[in-house]
Image (cartoon, grey):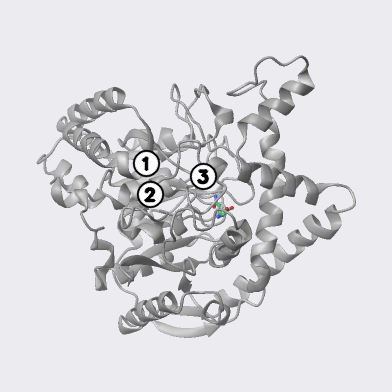
Amino acid sequence: MDSLEAQSAGLAAAEVSSVELVDAALARIEAADATLNAVVGVRGDAARAEAAAADARRSAGDRRSPLDGVPLLLKDNMVQQGEPTTCSSRILEGFVSPYDSTVVTRLREAGAIVLGRSNMDEFAMGSSTEHSVHGPAHNPWDTGRSCGGSSGGSAAAVSSGMLPFALGSDTGGSIRQPASFCGVTGLKPTYGRVSRFGLVAFASSLDQIGPIARTARECAWILDAIAGHDAKDSTSIPEPAPRVSDALDGDVSGLTIGMPREYFEEDGADPEVVSCVRAAISELERGGAKLIEVDLPHTPFVVSTYYLVATAEASSNLARYDGARYGRRAEGVSDVDEMYRRSRSEGFGDEVKRRILLGTYVLSAGYFDAYYRKAQQVRTLVRADFERAFAQCDVIAGPTYPEVAFELGSKQDDPINMYLSDVYTVSANLAGLPAISIPCGLVRDLPVGLQLQGRAMDEATLLRVADGFQGRTDHHDQRPPGHLGQAAR
Ligand code: GLN
């Protein structure tokens, strides 16, 4: 019983209690996390007490949502009152949040139980969950490999059956890429669909929170719980969020799927990954969808554009970690300048420093027009590419990532190579569009992700196609070898 759907049904039928689910999750974390390092903190007693309250409430007839009584993990960049948030950074050592993020408030209203926090790349910068003060997280399919990043701990925890779902954040692919590496489903909603209040900012015009679970249907339930306008986030979409779970009818007939020429000509991609994705898209055609080719001509520029915009915003957002206000302060300093310098030098890891330097450079006088302003202009062109494509099709399909999970350590010395592999995921953030990664097969015994991108505000169609695919296939039911969920009930 390791899926959200199974746990939810078990709770609804009173076959299992929320306390039992919390205890089972704690036992699985205990058994597997010494190997995976996916979880960086649990709140066992508090979660058990909340589960007991949820059990009492449901047995009195008050079941709030399909998530009611189900345990989950938060990525460690979403705050919860009275709990630490580290963002996998030394600089947040000792920080305890005085307030709840809006996603935590909404999950609580839906009855879900936050059991703990998941490992991630420091400040969500990375694609491997190797840049973490807690040490790297490992892929349950092959523990010598990366689980992806930056929401790698969330994906690994769901994949290994520790918990049925987790939240991640996605600035340039950080929900979708780890979902693809770990063989689970991950949704990045439209920019502004889910409130960012209480999400530690990386790049504010790109960041978005979303669910990681086994299926599109489960992601729809989670989105229904967390989506919607929030007065505390002025960029959240003012219109009420439609209930996307109502849109899932299992039917993809009559829909048009666009296949961008540029995504299938990509030289650097693993050919076996590309053919696995092509085969998956053919399955949608067998289900009655129409396939067409579309053009996204600015694809060759999306990675550079993303790394200019994201680092510029990060350099500004991370200015607040100065040793004075949050977390860790350097000791034995003689003046305020030294406090700033040493707190930041000691507190940030190398990848975060690299991004702050890059971002400061592209925003500096003399380079602003050449880099930052230019990147904003290209961003507009990328958005226009998608508008043209979506005049012809309902969703755009392609690979989530050019390769399967790579070996831990294999890319540490080559950050540019790691950046370039974000070519399929960053466009959805630049254009603000919803996108999902769903398992679509194995290459050399490792999961491959099919990415679907949708029109802004239209998570419903995106999830409908993903659900239609999962109704016709069983890739999402594959479990990693030696998977705990099979051993432990
Ligand atoms: N891999 C990308 C980066 O390193 C995406 C990160 C993210 O989405 N948070 O910036």
Residue type indicated by callout 2: His
Q: Is mark 1 within 8 Å of ligand 1?
A: no
- How far across and down, in percent of the image, does residue 159 sit? 30, 53
Q: Residue at x 33, y 83 (%)?
A: 288
- How far across and down, in percent of the image, does residue 37 sit? 37, 41
Mark 2 — residue?
138
Foreground: disc 1 or disc 3: 1
Asked if disc 1 and disc 3 are in contact, CB closer than 8 Å, the reply is: no
Question: In the image shown, does 450 or 38 lie closer to the viewer?
Answer: 38
Q: Is mark 2 within 8 Å of ligand 1?
A: no
Q: Which of the marked residues, 1 or 3, is nearer the chain's N terminus?
A: 1
- Few, some or many residues within 10 Å of mark 2 (<14, 14–19, 20+): many
Asked if disc 2 and disc 1 are in contact, CB closer than 8 Å, the reply is: yes
Q: Residue furthest left?
A: 15
Marks 1 and 3 sit apart, C-alpha to C-alpha, by 13 Å
Q: Is mark 3 within 8 Å of ligand 1?
A: yes
